[in-house]
Amino acid sequence: MSLKNVLRLAGVYSRASRLISKRNFRRYRDKRWETYAIYGLAVIIGIAAGAGIGYIYTIIPGQAALHDAIVSFFVTLPTLCILYSLVMMMMYQIRQTGVKVSVQPLYWFPVTWEDHTAASVLASSFSGTLWITLLICFAVLAVSVPLGLVPLAALTCVGLFLCLAFTGTTMEMFRIFQVGISGAIMRAAGRSAVWIRFVAMIVLFTVVYVVYFAATQSMGVFFNAVAQGQLTAWFVPYVWPGLALYAFSRGMWLQMALFSAGSLIFGAALFLAAVKLNARYALSDVATISVSKAYSPGKGLPGRLGLSGPESAVVKKDFRGFTRRSELMYVFIMPIVLLLATFMPLIMGNGGSSGGPGNSYYFLYMALLPSSALSMTLGMSIVGSEGERRWFLAQSPLLVKSFVKAKSFLPIMLGSGISVVFSIIGFVILSPTSRMGATGLVEGVLLAFAVGMAALTGGIAGADFRELPRPRMIRSEWSLITTLLCLVSGLLVILPVLVYGVVTSFGVIIPGISVNGAFLYVAWLLSGIIALAVVIVFYRISVMYAGRLLGDLE
Amino acid sequence: MVTDNSPAIKLSGVRKVYGDVVAVERLDLEIGRGEVLGLLGPNGSGKSTTIKMAMGLVKPSEGTVNVLGIDPIKDPVGVKKLIGYVPESPRIYEFLTALEFLDLTGDLYGMGAGEKKERIHEFIGAFGLEGREGDIINSYSDGMKQKVAIISALMHRPNLLLLDEPLRGLDPKAAKIMKDLLHELAGQGVTSVISTHTLEIAQAMCTRIVIMYNGRLLALGTMDELRKAAAMPDSGLEDIFLRMTGSGDIKPVVEALMK
């Protein structure tokens, strides 16, 4: 392995990861000082924080207890480093799935797989986690001076970087393994491959987001679990650097030597495994997914629902795009994550007891929000997702109105479908009243129509067809405008029901006020009329903008 | 309405400006029915812009465009129905299979189910995509993707073909099929405009050749007319092209590189 090659390649790979995170890929100019300024800032903040804690240590009573607490904290830091860097690297990898350009190993140059693997591990360690590790290291070193813990602090820093390397190498293995395994599964799965990949991606994304939320929302619990769990999990090699530190802090020299040597051997084994996996899978071809050789032209569901042949064809194409393009699958994850993020505290809190106004709130949330969010994200992205293939629809004899109808079908229909499904699930789990259940269902569908159409208008007006480094789909200013449009449209649609709900609530609080139950049906009707008006207005604006979009490819 | 006597394409005083850059300058060009016209020129000479203006995909800054008797700005859908188009680097929907993509094309052009099925199978067989037609296009080679784009341009029986580097990446058999097909289609009155950098192909396939340079029409005519215009009676298209575009003096460049 050539250190010169490793450092050179690591520089290229980390520059590439900086580059693909920028908005303007083609005009990006790498500013080194900006990159290194973050590390410099982390060092300064670390030293300041450490010095501050050190100063507090010198002026407060009960120094012995604080001293012991800080020693305990030091020895858990390497294991904590594994956990936070794992979460951050997972998020980084998730972000990478949307990137259309990737850094391919420069296999035609005289570079070994060891060089490439080491560089890749270094680069992924730099991406997002290095500044935190630097901050912690310098804080630890600064605080160790007044406490007289400099040797332990120095070893803690070594442990931190060793654990960062563990995580980087593990993520590298996971990434390559996933390429190899998913390729093998795709080949073996045949026609089911598309759906296996779709479900697997949704599950993976959801798990990562849930882990991320759980980790960021309950850091205290997390830290306690690490502090207590490190000793009991001594057989897990990832905690060995922490255990070596623990042994050092207690003068257990033999154990320290054993865990230190074990850590180094484990690190080397991980690295060799990553090299082998890279050599085996890094250059494997794109897995061929074979859908079907049988050809039977037909109208499909959109055609049966009244869309014309060209409209139906565009809808079928879009649906396939959103279920087959990994960068577009995130729109399906949002409702799931919204739901999980809401119900996790509910489940963890009281086990989801039924009945009561709280459950009615959760039911409405479940019936209205995920489906509206899906309609909004789909509507915003469905036109921009054409990307560099925009020419194909532009050169096709597709009427502008047909284009708008076809593009509005998925945001509206999928949103409505999700609303119906979630209303039914919510009704079963949360047992709201039947009137509440019906209101959720009706309003959910109306919202999907209004929000879907409003989002599509923004998606057409602000379409961004750039695909490098990742598909943009909508310009950021239009994303904001569209979100506001959807919010206003949604509020307008539910306003009659909202008013009915508020007045009814007054009736519960103030005995003299009573509301006739029939007004709820009037509120539904008004909501329907408002939703229809919103759809018509935004449809017309969409047609106007779509005409410009298809008429000029400049 | 399409009238048989009208030229396939008529560009009159067409000019296209992007900011300060003039992409096409006062272009007058008439292309007859059944003609195979070669559109040549160095990079940035305005070939692709000219094709896009004929398609109605780019609006000219000045001048008028008439395609098969229709103004593409006034009736873009009417023109598009009659045209088959292969862009310079066709980005097609790579998440679809070839069958799905061609089915989409057929639906957009309003083809009936029976005709669509028949044409797709004919072309898939002719271009050697049998056995791979059900695979997602993402796994295709560039040449295979090009074949899919070409089939999508031809399958709806267009009256005019606008082809930007159509033979790029094709294997010899597919290239030969394409050349013969264009020849046969010309016999049936189908006009083809081929933009290419491969001068041998242009010389072999085209009835007339246009040479563009810096957005201007430099020369237009048959091979004999071009030879006469360049005063190079025994030369091939490559020498004529290099002379006309002022890039003929290549020897010193090569010698410098060999030092």
Image (cartoon, coloured by chain):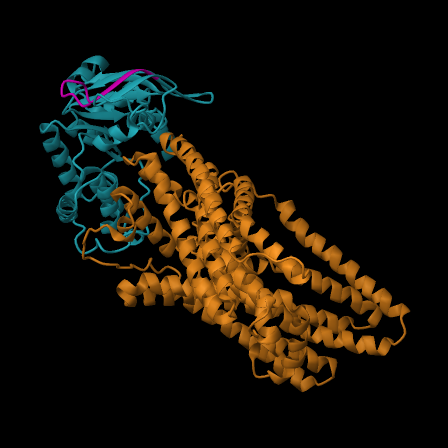
Chain colours: A orange, B cyan
As for residue B3 lying within the magenta part, the answer is yes
Q: Is residue A23 above or below residue B162?
A: below
> Relative to B160, is A306 on the left or the right?
right
Which residue is found at the position 50% from the left and 67% from the top?
Answer: A207
Number of residue marks: 0
Could one spot residue A118 in this view of the protein? no
Quadrant occupied by the N terminus of chain B: top left
Q: Which is more toward the observer, A117 or A450?
A: A450
Which quarter of the figure has residue A84? bottom right
Q: Position of residue A403 (x, y in %)?
A: 34, 39
Q: Position of residue B167 (x, y in %)?
A: 22, 38
As for residue A227 lying within the magenta part, the answer is no
Q: Which is more toward the observer, B24 or A481?
A: A481
Which residue is found at the position 66% from the left and 73% from the top?
Answer: A221
Q: Position of residue A107 (x, y in %)?
A: 40, 56
Quadrant occupied by the C terminus of chain B: top left
Q: Position of residue B217 (x, y in %)?
A: 30, 17
Which quarter of the figure has residue A416? bottom left
Q: Over which residues does the magenta segment extend?
A: B1-14
Q: Residue furthest front?
A: A512
Q: Which is more toward the observer, A48 or A380?
A: A380
Could one spot residue A123 in this view of the protein? yes
Q: Which is more toward the observer, A225 or A344?
A: A344
> Relative to A264, is B190 on the left or the right?
left
Which quarter of the figure has residue A481? top right
